[in-house]
Amino acid sequence: MISYAPGDLIPGPDVIMTRRLGAGGQGEVILAWNEALKSRVVLKLLNPELVGHDAERMFQKEARLMTQLRHRNIVRVVHAGWTREEIRRPYYIMDEEPGAIPLSELIASRTPFAVSNVLSIGIQVCDALHKAHTLTGPNKELLGAIHRDLKPANLLIMKDDDGNTIVKLLDFGIAWALYLVVHGLVARAFHGTVAYASPEQHIGRAVPQSDLYSLCVVLYELLAERHPFWDAEDVNDMMALHRFKKARPLTEYVVGLPASVVALIAKNLDKDPTKRSRSAAELKADLIL
């Protein structure tokens, strides 16, 4: 695979690499300069192994879906295409969010969150999920996108001009859709992050309520300052705990939480998705005290 260094022109998106933000099994994320727009952008390059079969068609379909997800709480995908490298590979470009910090970094630095801030984060993420889950196509057909990987690393925290906390949700898994097509897998394969994935995702199923479960794992972690299953010994243990063990009540770790908040988070951590909130809109309404 071609490796780029700061200052290199990346053919296809025709942006200049500033620095690498991260890399993983499905691709790399790069902060880059768009000379035409005179602005910085975030570029996600997918791995060459994702090229071929029906990947291009699937990628274009998913990219169109992402560009329709215009919402103040979703990081916007502004363009998608294929590189002009020796082995062409798909990419997409997202808006840079200046000053945004991944929630995972704030958690790692032990940043405390007031209950009101946690509820605000939950409400804003619900707004983003409602937009995705209810997205319709040109003929009003439901295109709803399930995130499947909602976790602190995919939540960006920033401040608006008035000092209010704004949450931006990113990565709806275009790379994963491609991976399924290229490797001949069905949508029932597992996708997510073990520590935050719902019980049903661990057996290859995802529904809109799966995202609500993941969100409430995050909210629990912010309120309790620990993961619901912080005592998991390894990945397999974590999976088993998500599937079979009820999370300890928040009241074991936090004093003075509104009973309605404790009950709501417990409800959405239920192993049975049909017993959780019926929609992101319903969860949002219940988070507003």
Image (cartoon, grey):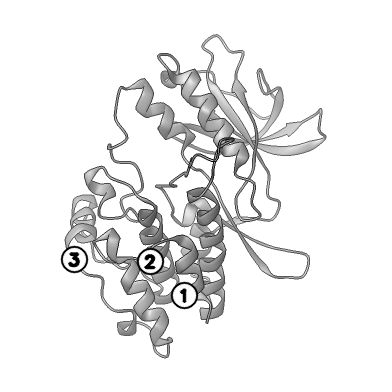
User: Distance of mark 2 from mark 3, alpha carbons?
Assistant: 20 Å
Q: Residues within 10 Å of mark 3 (few under 14, many from 20)?
A: few
Q: What separation in Å lies between label 3 and label 1 (alpha carbons)? A: 25 Å
Judge from the rendering whether residue 230 lies leftward or rightward of residue 102; answer left or right.
left
Identify the residue at image location x=50%, y=25%. Answer: 59
Q: Nearer the viewer, residue 57 or 242?
A: 57
Residue pointed to by mark 3: 245
Q: Is residue 267 placed above or below 60 in the rendered structure?
A: below
Does the image show residue 20? no
- What amino acid type is highlighted by mark number 2? Ser
Residue ranking furthest to the top:
86
Say which residue label 2 marks: 277
Q: Position of residue 2 (x, y in %)?
A: 54, 18
Judged by depth in the image, the label closer to the viewer, 2 or 3, is 2
| Amino acid beneath label 3 | Lys
The answer to whether mark 3 and mark 1 are in CB contact below 8 A is no
Secondary element at image label 3? loop
Q: Is residue 186 visible?
A: yes
Q: Which residue is denoted by mark 1 in the rendering?
A: 286
Viewer-nearest residue: 158 or 144: 144
Vertical comparison of 222 with 8: above or below: below
Residue 138 lies in quadrant: top right
- Taking depth in this image into account, of 278 and 232 the one nearest to the observer is 278
Assign a secondary structure to mark 2. Answer: loop
Q: Earlier in the sequence, mark 2 or mark 1?
A: 2
For the residue marked with disc 1, what is the amino acid?
Asp
Q: Are marks 2 and 1 in contact (CB under 8 Å)?
A: yes
